[in-house]
Amino acid sequence: MVSKNYMNILSEFITQNIESLLLGVIILSIITLIIFIIVNIKLSKMLKKYKELTKGVDGSNLEELLLHQSDSLKNVQGEIVDMKKSITQLKQDGLQMISKVYSKRYNAFPEMGSDLSFSVVFLNDENSGIVITSIYGRDENRVYLKPVIEGKSRYSLSPEEKEIIAKAISK
């Protein structure tokens, strides 16, 4: 009996307020339609952007493009590691290469008329290398080669040799 009572009350309410209820349903339908249109427009814009993104440059999809870029990145990283090793080796080799050269011509014997004698030094960044001296005389020419380690030689050096070694080191 309670359910019949409830149904009657509901039926009377609907019949008395049918116009208001229909107006509310129409307004709700219009609002739902507007929201549907807005969502549909946004979805179509997103779909268009998604298609452009997945299309790729050469027609491949985004996944293929990302995999290709990932492989390329791994290759580049490997090359960078190799280059760093090469640079380290070049730096080590560079310390041993001749980077300081200095020479001087002079007259070893005052009675001789010209600067025909000379000394030349070849040093690396650690100030090690050689000094070559040529002493020119009337009857003979002598050439001396002396090793230089950290700016010093275990052989006695002439004043000219000491001078060019000092100038090469300060260069």
Image (cartoon, grey):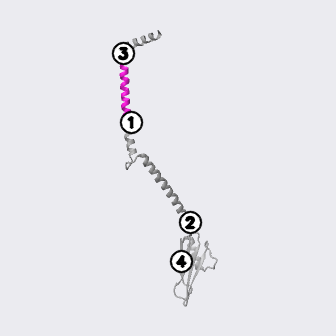
| Residue type beneath disc 2 | Gln
Residue at x-position 54% and y-position 61%: 85
- Which numbered disc, 4 or 3, marks the residue that appears first in the sequence? 3
Secondary structure, mark 2, is helix
Residues 33 and 136: in front is 33
Residue at x-position 48% and y-position 55%: 75
- The residue that mark 4 highlights is 103
- The residue that mark 1 highlights is 43
Which quarter of the picture shows residue 106? bottom right
* Disc 4 packing (10 Å; few <14; some 14–19; many ≥20): some
Q: Nearer the viewer, mark 1 or mark 2?
A: 1
Can you say whether 11 is above or below 110 in the image? above
Badge number at residue 101 = none
Q: Position of residue 50 (x, y in %)?
A: 39, 41
- The residue that mark 2 highlights is 92
Secondary structure, mark 3, is helix
Residue that extends furthest to the right in the rendered view of this protein: 154
Segment colored magenta: 22-44
Can you say whether 35 is above or below 2 in the image? below
| Residue type beneath disc 3 | Ile
Residue at x-position 36% and y-position 28%: 33
Q: Nearer the viewer, mark 4 or mark 3?
A: 3
- Which numbered disc, 2 or 3, marks the residue that appears first in the sequence? 3
Q: Nearer the viewer, mark 1 or mark 4?
A: 1
* Disc 1 packing (10 Å; few <14; some 14–19; many ≥20): few
- Which numbered disc, 4 or 2, marks the residue that appears first in the sequence? 2
- Which numbered disc, 1 or 4, marks the residue that appears first in the sequence? 1
- The residue that mark 3 highlights is 18
Which quarter of the picture shows residue 161? bottom right
Which quadrant of the rendered structure holds the C terminus?
bottom right
